[in-house]
Image (spheres, grey):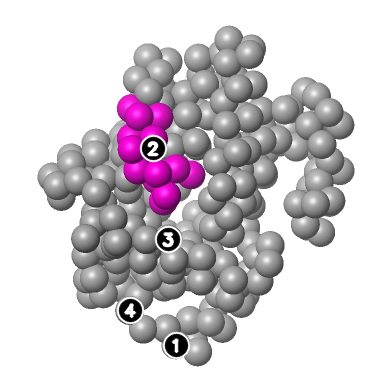
Amino acid sequence: MQVRHWDALSNLAQNKLQTGLDMLPTSDELPDITRRYWLNIGWTHMECALVNKAIAAQEKALQYARSISSVIAEGEALANLAWGETWTDPDAAKTHAKEAIRLSHKTGNLIDEQRGYLALAIASAGTAPDEEFYTALQKAQDLAYRTGNRRSTLYMHFARAWHAAIQNDDQTLNRSIAEIDSISTLAKCRQNWADIARAWLSGQTREHAELAARWEWLDGFDETMCRRRELLDNCKGLAA
């Protein structure tokens, strides 16, 4: 599984990350990068759909950002927290996404402002009128063009894939998967996202399983994809 690495992350952390999160150093071992430590822990758990653990880690990142009185860090932590909450707690996600947008706009942080809008869009999918989803997504798209960042565009297609899955629209979902596959290959990041999105298709195939098995998941691709599918089923239940 691809994990977002930061320049400040020590070799110790990187080596332990390869052998599982239980082997990671504690934040006390890495006092100078505590916030990045929790952001990375949160992202790793989120990639594997361990949502509760992801949210807990991002909450620690937020607490630390507030303890050092950094508005930029707080906006980033809120955007990450909202991203984790979108899948299970849309109301909390919307609240934190809006605050992330406000703070990131204030500091000129376009990347986390865009991620706030993306979290807002995903949280709206199936839980609010479609207009709210498309409005938030359009704002995210405008920011993606301004940054010229391929990762920002990749996030947009991931949000579209989720929305299509909520709508039981496999045709649109397949188009989004193709875009995710193409952009992630070019950007050399999040290449596992196409396989995550395939877990939301109405029919699973052996080919899908083989593709997902390419990556290193914390407890196996079968378990991870089952959790991703369960997140979708739960959201559809809320929509109903």
The quarter in which the N terminus is drawn is bottom right
Which class describes the residues within 10 Å of circle 1: few (<14), some (14-19), or many (20+)? few
- Distance in Å between CA atoms under marks 4 and 1: 10 Å
Q: Nearer the viewer, mark 3 or mark 4?
A: 3
Amino acid beneath label 4: Ser
Going by the numbered disc 1, the residue's amino acid type is: Thr
In this view, 73 is above or below 26: above
Identify the residue at image location x=77%, y=57%: 20
In the picture of the structure, the residue carrying the numbered disc 1 is: 205
Report if residue 6 is visible in the image: yes
Question: Measured along the vertical axis of the image, is residue 214 above or below residue 44?
Answer: below
Packing grade of label 3 (10 A; few <14, some 14-19, many >=20) is: some
Q: Is residue 59 above or below residue 83?
A: above
Magenta includes 94?
A: yes
Sequence-wise, the earlier of marks 4 and 2 is: 2
Left or right, 199 with reference to 176: right
User: Which mark lies nearer to you, 4 or 1?
Assistant: 4
Label 4 secondary element: loop
Q: Quadrant of the C terminus?
A: bottom left
Q: Which mark is residue 202?
A: 4
Q: Which residues are magenta?
A: 84-98
- The residue at the point 82 percent across, 36 percent down is 26
Badge number at residue 231: 3
Q: Amino acid at mark 3?
A: Leu
Residue 214 occupies quadrant:
bottom right
Give the amino acid type for the residue marked by disc 2 in the picture: Ala
Q: Report how far apart the C-alphas of labels 3 and 4 lie in the structure.
A: 14 Å
State the mark number for residue 93: 2
Q: Residue furthest top?
A: 69
Distance from disc 3 to disc 2, alpha carbons, whole Å, reads 15 Å
Q: CA distance from mark 3 to mark 1?
A: 19 Å
The disc, 3 or 4, on the residue closer to the chain's N-terminal end is: 4
